[in-house]
Image (cartoon, grey):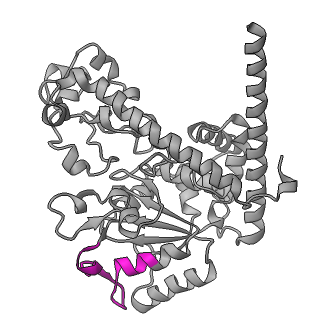
Amino acid sequence: MNRDFKKRDRELEERISRDYQRMVKECDLHLDLMERELPPPIEPLVEQLESSGISRRSFMKWSAATTAALMLPPIFKSRVARAAEQFGRVPVVWLHFAECTGCSEALLRTSYPNIDDLILETLSLEYHETLMAAAGYQAEENLEKALHDFPGKFICVIEGALPTGLNGKYLTLGAKGRTGMEIAREVTSKAAAVICIGSCSSFGNVQAAKPNPTDAKGISDALGIQTVNIPGCPPNPINFIGTILHYLMFGALPPLDSLGRPIWAYGKRIHDYCERRPHYDAGEFVEEWGDSGAQKGWCLYKMGCKGPYTYANCAKVRFNDGVSWPIMGGHGCMGCVEPNFWDTMAPLEKPIAEKTFGGGEKTVDDIGKILAGVTAAGIATHGTVSYIKRHNQKDFAKPEDEV
């Protein structure tokens, strides 16, 4: 019996080793292909790091942490670093629709330049309505030029929901007065990948909340296309950076859950990693704002925290240069990375179980297990399909080049 187990273990280790070898070769081939076919970064990351006083050692530490966050083995640390240095090679067309521009603000604002910020600064932004100096017809020409120069090679990043009512006429943009629907269809049809940044473009967000008079929708629902969704209001910049890095390394999107979110960033409940979780387990809850429990940092579930129903890595990566995040700051999670959270998570400062599930806090973990099972099923299905699709394509290597 022991021999059988040992044999199975050896076979499993060998299979994993072969899979990693394949991944490493695919990664190297794609990075080589990018360096040959795409223009060099306008401002090399290495120079930015040096001018900002960031050492190579610090950069490699960041690469190791990012490798772990992306659920990749340590062998990919040097490849994550190489991909980060090539960040500016990928042309990006950034579209704005029905939104507040908070996602762009979250990416741009920082108290001091760190590695994440410097990497974002190297993005080859061919079109971004908030940042570019051009306006009117000149701006239209910039967009047309980007689509002409980089067909099938640029990443389309979309911020904001799409109003679909009145054939999209609730949102007309630019000197030519085209609807958001028309622009989105044209640009996404020519993009190598479409990334929805923020809950508005991912799921519709507040624009799609009841009664939704403009019939606003997330990009995937509005256009009927596959998108990578980086939800949050706003999302953490590292979730966007990690997704781009995966694309740079493998020429493919990261594994996604059933809602189109990268598993590495949205695969676990906030409830499971929250620093207040021990107080939940001990039955220690804040009963009202400012009480002794609030001063002691007790669990915020009874104040409406939606952490048990929310899948995100906020507790790990935090915000404002990693300083804090909402629950650490004293307010419960609103569930902003989940679809239709304005409707399904309301009221935001009362336990959702009392309104929807009727079981109080005792049912939280049971509900969480059910949600985890549904998500896992979606992940498994998507992962299987992605693997089959990926290994039926020849984007990375010819059969004779495979490991």
Write down the quadrant of residue 62 in the picture.
top right
Residue lying furthest right in this view? 400
Write down the quadrant of residue 321 in the picture.
top left
How many labels sit on residues? Answer: 0
Viewer-nearest residue: 37 or 339:
339
Write down the quadrant of residue 70 in the picture.
top right
Picture residue at 46% right of the left edge, 38% below the top = 377
Q: Return the x and y of residue 356 as percentages of the image width and height.
A: 17, 36
Viewer-nearest residue: 10 or 294:
10
Picture residue at 56% right of the left edge, 81% below the top = 147
Q: Return the x and y of residue 107 as percentages of the image width and height.
A: 44, 57
Residue 292 vs residue 323: left or right?
left
Viewer-nearest residue: 190 or 70:
190
- Look at the image and say whether residue 207 sits in the magenta stretch: no
Viewer-nearest residue: 200 or 355:
355
Q: Return the x and y of residue 78 as percentages of the image width and height.
A: 73, 44
Q: Can residue 269 be seen in this view?
A: no
Residue 377 vs residue 400: left or right?
left
Q: Identify the magenta region.
A: 164-185
Residue lying furthest top in this view? 1
Residue 74 vs residue 264: left or right?
right
Residue 241 vs residue 37: left or right?
left
Q: Is residue 153 visible?
A: yes
402 relative to 369, above or below: below
Q: Return the x and y of residue 20 as percentages of the image width and height.
A: 74, 39
347 relative to 157, above or below: above
Looking at the rendered image, the quarter that the N terminus falls into is top right
- Look at the image and say whether residue 183 sits in the magenta stretch: yes
378 relative to 50, above or below: above
